[in-house]
Image (cartoon, helix red, strand yellow):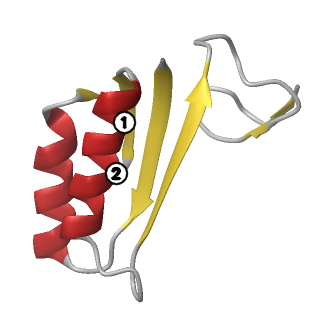
Amino acid sequence: MRYLVTYDVVDNKRRTKLFKFLLGYGINVELSVFEIVVNNEGLREIVKGIENIIDPKEDAVFIFPYSGEPIRNGIYHGKNYGDVFV
């Protein structure tokens, strides 16, 4: 299954550690966004690794499953999309 992992980690040391950890599982597509393709066991490994790195009182990590198609009903802003409402 394909996932987008995005994070907001306050501490530079934890952020660097999380970045390097996620590089072992997928492709960095934006500063704090990774595209990862794993099975259920791989996803459990990733979640466990994330839990061991972040401080849940300060940091946030989101994992979104997706099919590789554009996400529908989204709002996109920025250099790649302009202001596009899909």
Q: Along the line of sight, which residue is nearer the eye, 31 or 73?
A: 73
In the figure, residue 76 lies in which quadrant? top right
Determine whether, in the image, residue 4 is placed left or right of residue 72. Answer: left
Q: Along the line of sight, which residue is nearer the eye, 76 or 32?
A: 32
Residues under labels 1 and 2: Cα distance?
6 Å
Residue count near mark 2 (Cα–Cα under 10 Å), binned few <14, some 14–19, many ≥20 = few
In the figure, residue 70 lies in which quadrant? top right
Residue 30 bears which disc, if any?
Answer: none
Query: Which corner quadrant holds the C terminus?
Result: top right
Give the mark count. Answer: 2
Instruction: Specify the amino acid type for callout 1.
Output: Leu
Label 2 near label 1: C-beta < 8 Å?
yes
Determine whether, in the image, residue 32 is placed left or right of residue 27. Answer: right
Determine whether, in the image, residue 57 is placed left or right of residue 9. Answer: right
Residue 43 bears which disc, if any?
Answer: 1
Q: Secondary structure at mark 1?
A: helix
Q: Is residue 29 visible?
A: no
Q: Position of residue 33 (x, y in %)?
A: 40, 42
Task: Name the residue rendered at 72%, 32% in the picture.
Answer: 82
Task: Name the residue rendered at 20%, 56% in the picture.
Answer: 18
- Above or below, 9 relative to 64: below
- Above or below, 12 relative to 44: below
Task: Name the residue rendered at 19%, 50% in the picture.
Answer: 19
Task: Name the residue rendered at 28%, 44% in the picture.
Answer: 46
Q: Along the line of sight, which residue is nearer the eye, 14 or 40?
A: 40
Instruction: Specify the amino acid type for callout 2.
Output: Val
- Mark 2 = which residue? 47
Q: Is residue 40 visible?
A: yes
Q: Secondary structure at mark 2?
A: helix
